[in-house]
Image: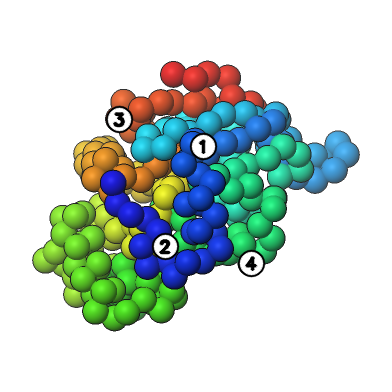
Amino acid sequence: MTDRTEGHGGTAVAGAAAQDGGGEPMVRVEDLSRTYGTGAAAVHALRGVTFTVPRGELVALKGRSGSGKTTLLNLVGGLDTPDGGSVAVDGLELAALGEKGLLELRRERIGFIFQSFGLIPILSAAENVGVPMRLRKEDPRAREERVELLLGLVGLADHARQRPGELSGGQQQRVAIARALANRPALIIADEPTGQLDAETGHAVMELLRAVVRSEGVTALVATHDAAMLDLADRVLELNDGRIVEHV
């Protein structure tokens, strides 16, 4: 398994995770609730959601639009704050971290993959993959070596100098997967990563993500409508009207 604390410089989040996370599931969600708005206009996005994601597994989250999938991913990723309940990632209670701690957690321990790819248009594929390491001020030589390794891992070694506009949708998502792995995260959070891809390309991307979970020793929580993705998952959670209604 990849040593995901390597190069983190003994940061508080990385150190605490290494000390406290060994016996914990990668993600622990307990009685989580989130409501937007008030009164008659209130939207109850999540209602008492509880589940765990074991380390090293790919867990798929399915449900119709509006079922609460994106809200749940945002809460697990520390991008939003729940109204009730708790979230722990890699042994760390998110509510105890504060803004600085959450920023560090997202930068050091979580890799995000989005439906819209989220690549920087003026940067090459290699430069996009290297952005998280630049933000962390990683040694340039180590950064370049890591970028080369990751582009090879996702099958884009020959496209390092191309910009996103010169790549297909599937290739852009592969770059996004490589970028998500740049800082050796403990957890990958992916929100509809095949949503803009045709069925064949989407299946190839999901098979790649499945292989990456195995080869990099990471955990993944993936929201998807893609039936092929559900087949590749270790476990499937179904959300309906803000509640977990099925564990498969």
Q: Which numbered disc, 2 or 1, marks the residue closer to the eye?
A: 1
Q: Amino acid at mark 1?
A: Glu
State the CA–CA distance, disc 2 to disc 4: 23 Å
Instruction: Name the residue at 51% across, 37% down.
Output: 24
Q: Which residue is mark 3?
A: 232
Using the image, determine if residue 78 lies above or below residue 65: below
Could you tell me how far apart the alpha carbons at marks 3 and 2 are, in whole angstroms? 24 Å
Asked if residue 222 lies left or right of residue 229, the reply is right
Q: Earlier in the sequence, mark 1 or mark 4?
A: 1
User: Is label 3 or label 1 in front?
Assistant: 1
Residue at figure coordinates x 19%, y 75% from the top left: 161
Judging by the rendered image, the residue that carries numbered circle 2 is: 118
Residue placed most toward the observer, 62 or 88: 88
Residue drawn at the location 72% of the way across and 37% of the way down: 85
C-alpha separation, residue under disc 1 versus residue under disc 4: 23 Å
Total numbered labels placed on residues in the image? 4
Mark whose residue sits in front, 4 or 3: 4
State the residue position of label 4. Answer: 100
Q: Do the residues under discs 3 and 1 have CB atoms within 8 angstroms?
A: no
Q: Amino acid at mark 4?
A: Lys
Pointers 1 and 4 in contact (CB under 8 A)? no
Kindly identify the residue that appears in the image at 54 percent across and 55 percent down: 16
Q: Amino acid at mark 2?
A: Gly
Is residue 195 visible in the rendered image? The answer is no
Q: Indicate the amino acid at tag 3.
A: Leu
Looking at the rendered structure, the secondary structure element under dot 2 is loop
Task: From the top left corner, tell me how far across and down residue 206 is, in percent.
Answer: 29, 40
